């Protein structure tokens, strides 16, 4: 059936399992909106393309399905590049489809013109391509969706010239064949790791966000081999927080290097062990190490002496769990408990007043609550100590580290998971990057508590300046009355000043028929 290509794209995405599109229509991409309703897609109208991108990111993290955005040429793409960069660093399947001008080399002064739109997007995503035919557009969409399922999930960008979107195009192929999956480990690699574990007395596992789906097998592995474990922030919940040999998500504590130096075998699964995971150049171990990752770049960057296994985390953990094992550990559960308590005390001293509020919040939330946090001191402290019952419940802008993530990402996450409880945690400064998306939550009637930590300044930057012996500069801002601002958008608000009032406000927000901003401060009485 012939339709304008812009309409065909929506029908193709629906055929491939996409349910929701995030975006903003404009004159340059209106043809992509021709087929949305006919195809049966739900469109979420953001207030800014940055918000649309973060919503799609949150939707993808919450559901495991790709987040898809429609944006216009030029400024629309530029506005969504920050979410694309965040999705790249955090391995989120995000597909951005933008219009583009048909010709830019011989003409200047066109509406929304960029010198190199394709190249600009390429700086923050896995690949950026321009389709010159309908068949190319179909092929690139299928390529993106295939790679989301078989490689490390990272954002992709497709540009389609406006005249091509307007022109009639043949229908896409209905058959969508997934390419061969290379996630299975070689038997020899599994046997090699099992042999190393059999000889180790103090084995240590580190599980990252790439191992979330391997949770049952990962827990079985640590038990069977008597191994200690850490998780990265993104991997929290993979190992039971009550496991007596689990060190938690404290890798960023400088003293964790000493702990890792005690291990006689280190196995890192589904993690880059990047700067934002450990905040030092090396983990600190001097034993033999095995790096298990699906990303060839991660393996190439490992130390030459490390053993490297390229495969999926789920497949590797399952295969290794079937190997014979006898736990013979030299780790002390009492020492591990004391170390965790020491690290929690360090955090309380570094960021006073936050952990009591975090503890009160955790007590008030159902265990299955999904949390989206921003770059804020509250999240920095809480994500180290907050015990997660399962992975994939706390989502944070770990790598790229943008402000303004929490609110729109929580909106996307809530759209994705429906009745499941979802909350946002934001700081007073970062919240103002994307606060306009509060209108979307009101418009859709989303039950969404928003915990706003208001210390009246850029607290983390102030502390960093003081530590560097720089007189704090440009770290204090004038804030609005956040409760009145939320109410102006049609949201509810609360400003509790006791633990009981705080937890009551949370309970009410979790049953409200719209978003609720809960304003908290360092002196709020908790």
Image (spheres, helix red, strand yellow):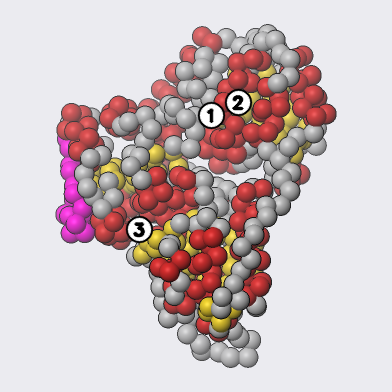
What label sits on residue 218 in the rendered view? 2
Say whether marks 1 and 2 touch (CB < 8 Å): yes
Residue shown at 22%/35% (left/top)? 507
Picture layout, residue 239 above or below residue 132: above
The image shows residue 327 at horizontal and vertical percentages of: 67, 10
**Farthest-out residue, right:** 188
The image shows residue 175 at horizontal and vertical percentages of: 64, 59
Visible residue check, residue 319: yes
Ranked by sequence position, the earlier of labels 1 and 2 is 2
Q: What is the CA distance from the residue labelled 1 to the residue labelled 3? A: 31 Å
The image shows residue 188 at horizontal and vertical percentages of: 83, 29
Crowd tier of the residue under label 1, counting other residues whose Cα lies within 10 Å: few below 14, some 14–19, many 20 or above: many
What label sits on residue 434 in the rendered view? 3
Q: What is the CA distance from the residue labelled 1 to the residue labelled 2? A: 7 Å
What label sits on residue 238 in the rendered view? 1
What kind of element bears circle 2? helix
What label sits on residue 365 in the rendered view? none
Residue shown at 73%/37% (left/top)? 184
Q: Is residue 35 left or right of residue 472?
A: right
Q: Is residue 448 left or right of residue 257?
A: left
Q: Is residue 188 left or right of residue 35?
A: right
Q: What is the CA distance from the residue labelled 2 to the residue labelled 3? A: 37 Å
Q: Look at the image and give the residue range highlighted in magenta.
A: 475-497
The image shows residue 248 at horizontal and vertical percentages of: 51, 25
Picture layout, residue 28 above or below residue 184: below
What kind of element bears circle 1? loop
Which label sits in the foreground, 2 or 3?
2
What kind of element bears circle 3? loop
Residue closest to the eye, 54 or 359: 54
Picture layout, residue 46 above or below residue 159: above
């Amino acid at each position: 059936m012939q339709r304008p290509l812009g309409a065909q794209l929506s029908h193709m995405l629906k055929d491939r399992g996409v349910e929701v599109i995030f975006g903003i229509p404009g004159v340059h991409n209106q043809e992509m909106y021709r087929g949305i309703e006919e195809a049966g897609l739900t469109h979420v109208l953001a207030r800014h393309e940055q918000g649309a991108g973060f919503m799609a990111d949150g939707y993808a993290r919450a559901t495991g399905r790709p987040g898809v955005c429609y944006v216009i040429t030029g400024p629309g793409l530029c506005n969504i590049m920050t979410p694309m960069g965040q999705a790249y660093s955090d391995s989120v399947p995000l597909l951005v489809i933008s219009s583009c001008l048909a010709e830019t080399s011989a003409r200047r002064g066109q509406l929304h013109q960029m010198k190199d739109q394709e190249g600009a997007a390429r700086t923050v995503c896995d690949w950026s391509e321009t389709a010159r035919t309908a068949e190319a557009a179909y092929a690139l969409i299928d390529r993106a969706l295939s790679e989301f399922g078989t490689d490390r999930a990272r954002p992709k960008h497709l540009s389609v010239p406006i005249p091509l979107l307007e022109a009639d195009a043949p229908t896409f192929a209905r058959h969508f064949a997934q390419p061969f999956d290379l996630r299975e480990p070689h038997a020899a690699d599994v046997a090699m790791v099992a042999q190393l574990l059999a000889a180790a007395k103090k084995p240590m596992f580190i599980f990252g966000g790439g191992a979330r789906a391997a949770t049952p097998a990962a827990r079985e592995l640590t038990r069977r081999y008597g191994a200690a474990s850490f998780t990265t922030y993104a991997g929290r919940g993979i190992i039971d927080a009550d496991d007596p040999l689990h060190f938690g998500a404290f890798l960023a504590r400088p003293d964790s290097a000493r702990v890792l130096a005690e291990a006689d075998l280190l196995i890192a699964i589904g993690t880059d062990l990047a700067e934002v995971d450990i905040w030092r150049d090396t983990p600190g171990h001097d034993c033999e190490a095995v790096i298990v990752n699906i990303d060839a770049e991660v393996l190439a960057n490992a130390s030459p002496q490390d053993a490297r296994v390229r495969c999926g985390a789920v497949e590797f953990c399952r295969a290794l769990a079937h190997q014979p094992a006898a736990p013979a550990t030299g780790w002390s559960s009492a020492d591990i408990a004391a170390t965790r308590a020491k690290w929690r005390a360090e955090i309380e001293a570094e960021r006073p007043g936050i952990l009591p509020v975090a503890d009160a919040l955790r007590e008030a939330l159902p265990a299955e609550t999904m949390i989206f946090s921003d770059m804020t001191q509250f999240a920095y402290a809480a994500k180290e100590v907050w015990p997660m019952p399962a992975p994939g419940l706390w989502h944070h802008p770990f790598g790229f580290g943008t402000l303004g993530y929490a609110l729109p990402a929580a909106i996307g996450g809530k759209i994705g998971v429906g009745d499941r409880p979802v909350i946002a945690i934001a700081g007073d400064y970062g919240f103002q990057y994307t606060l306009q998306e509060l209108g979307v939550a009101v418009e859709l009637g989303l039950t969404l508590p928003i915990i706003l930590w208001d210390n009246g300044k850029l607290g983390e930057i102030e502390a960093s300046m003081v530590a560097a012996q720089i007189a704090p500069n440009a770290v204090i801002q004038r804030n609005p009355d956040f409760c009145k601002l939320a109410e102006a958008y049609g949201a509810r608000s609360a400003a509790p000043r006791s633990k009981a009032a705080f937890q009551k406000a949370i309970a009410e927000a979790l049953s409200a028929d719209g978003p609720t901003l809960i304003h908290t401060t360092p002196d709020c009485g908790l």
